[in-house]
Amino acid sequence: MSLSLVERVEMPPAVSAWCSYPTLYEIDTWIWLADLSRKYVTTIDLSSVPSAEWDAVAAYGFDSVWLMGVWERSPAGIAIANENRNLVEDFHRALPDFKPEDNVGSPYCVRRYVVDEHFGGPEGLATARRELAKRGMKLILDFVPNHVAPDHPWVTQHPEYFIHETIEDARNTPGSCIELQGNSFACGRDPYFPAWPDVLQLNAFEPALRRAVIETLSGIAEQCDGVRCDMAMLFLNAIFERTWGGRAESRPSTEYWADVISAIKAEKPGFIFIAEAYWDLEWELQQHGFDYCYDKKLYDRLEHSNAENIRLHLCADLEYQRKLLRFIENHDEPRAASVFSPAKERAAAVTSATLPGIKLFHEGQFEGRKVRPPVFLGRRPDEPVDENLRGFYRKLLEAVNREAFREGQWSLCERTGWPDNASFQNVLAWNWVHDDERYLIAVNLSDWPAQAKIQAPWADASGELHLIDLLSGATYERDGGEIRLPGLYVELAPWNFHFLQVSAS
């Protein structure tokens, strides 16, 4: 029997190569299909999604879609979750009429890396991938390195792949392990939180596991164009050793991710790896082969900090920044509409959508959904659509769906103020250049009005320039030399912005 436990499906050739700065749309697959089934009053899986729905996704101009949670869910994990009082309380908060059958299992408690039959199995996924490819979009799926479900076949076939607890360990830390077939398996965890009771911890230092993972990912790579790797930093040698100490094997001389990613890329050079990453380990993960890493620091600073701290973050080396994933919501974070004011959400969205790197948008974000259902749930409550917000996102995605934002050169702009007016410090600005295309973005990231002079580094800018704000429609005529020095004067209300296309008059 294959160690990969992945059903291989022949797929048509992939769409064109990745651009330098792509966009990615995350869909909670189970919930999305549940909503479509209600909408069309029939059962819909990935093989039967109406063309109009794929067209609606493609209309935003996305380069790729992340179908989150397509792998087989675990019945054992569902049973454990339904006995967890804290989880059940979360379910009721998100879904007041929650019933036990609404818990369809966590997509990160993987039973097998085979597409769940609920979604139409491997053939359903293959159909969805063809529909995306027809519309020029690639497909991203999940990979969970740290743990598997208690009923994963490896538990019986390869117990050596796991971290094991002693009887004393289990006695000292209740809930940290599961007894199965005479073995005491450690539950998955990160070093800062209690163990997750529905999953078993894999051993990153076990050579045979690395070989099995390469085979597993090789099978996954036949079915998609890239993977988002859950909690990727947990499998760095230093982190894993700190977490598990003597319960793991001897620390290997090579890094797990360097071994795994290089093996897959040798087979499929265009296949990409995205790391869910925290703890300032993004650069290290990039060095081990990740194409993109979560930029949680930008998200946290947009939510809680000030413009100067965001500016300092954006001063990082461009080679580092171009491999970051920018977002203002995803399935792990609260809905943007629930944590940001309407004006602040728009400013944060313009910021994250116009920086180098891969840009992530989350299904429901455009409609202004405020409830973030736990990933265990198979349905969500109805919420009214914010048509104004959806209109804003349509304009924003149309504006960034240009070659300059995919392949252009990005740079942070200097901005200055006046001795008696330091409000310029609340304004951040950057520009994109590609051949004859020029764009200048300025955002007031504060609760107060701000004025600033923004210096765009266009050495060839001269004569009159025509500026069109692609989001507001306003137009301006300015002198090109003035934009270089002393700078373009902007006056912005709290959380307001300019998205300027610049051309010769």
Image: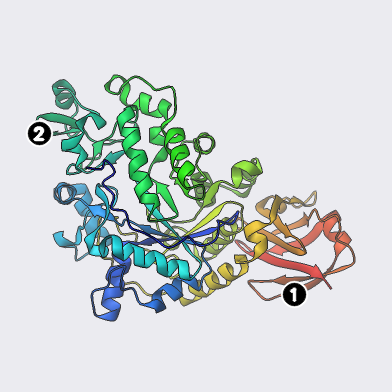
Residue named by callout 2: 181
User: Which disc, if any, is residue 121?
Assistant: none
Q: Which residue is mark 1?
A: 475
Label 2, secondary structure: give it.
loop
At 39% from the left edge and 77% from the top edge, which residue is drawn? 51
Tell me if residue 168 can be seen: yes
Dividing the image into 4 quarters, which one contains the N terminus? top left
Work out whether residue 235 or residue 312 is closer to the camera in this orientation and state it: 235
| Quadrant in which the C terminus appears | bottom right
**Mark 2 or mark 1, whichever is nearer to me:** 2
- Secondary structure at badge 1 equals strand
Q: Quadrant of residue 164?
A: top left
Total tally of numbered discs in the picture: 2
- Residue found at x 29% / y 80%: 40
> Which sits earlier in the primary sequence, circle 2 or circle 1?
2
The residue carrying pointer 2 sits among few (fewer than 14), some (14 to 19) or many (20 or more) residues within 10 Å by Cα, namely: few
Q: Position of residue 279 (x, y in %)?
A: 46, 36
Task: Report which quarter residue 168 is drawn in.
Answer: top left
Q: Residue at x 17, y 48 (%)?
A: 85
**Residue 31, image x and y in percent?**
30, 65
Q: Nearer the viewer, residue 218 or 391?
A: 218
Q: Amino acid at mark 2?
A: Gln
Q: Is residue 377 left or right of residue 129?
A: left
User: Which residue occupies the foreground of this view, 84 or 19?
Assistant: 19
Q: Is residue 167 above or below residue 401?
A: above
Residue 108 lies, in percent from the top left, at: 29, 48
**Crowd tier of the residue under label 1, counting other residues whose Cα lies within 10 Å: few below 14, some 14–19, many 20 or above:** few
Relative image position of residue 145 (x, y in whole percent): 34, 40
In the rendered structure, which amino acid carries the disc numbered 1?
Thr
Residue 368, can we see it? no
| Mark 2 and mark 1: Cα distance apart in space | 72 Å
Q: Residue furthest left?
A: 182
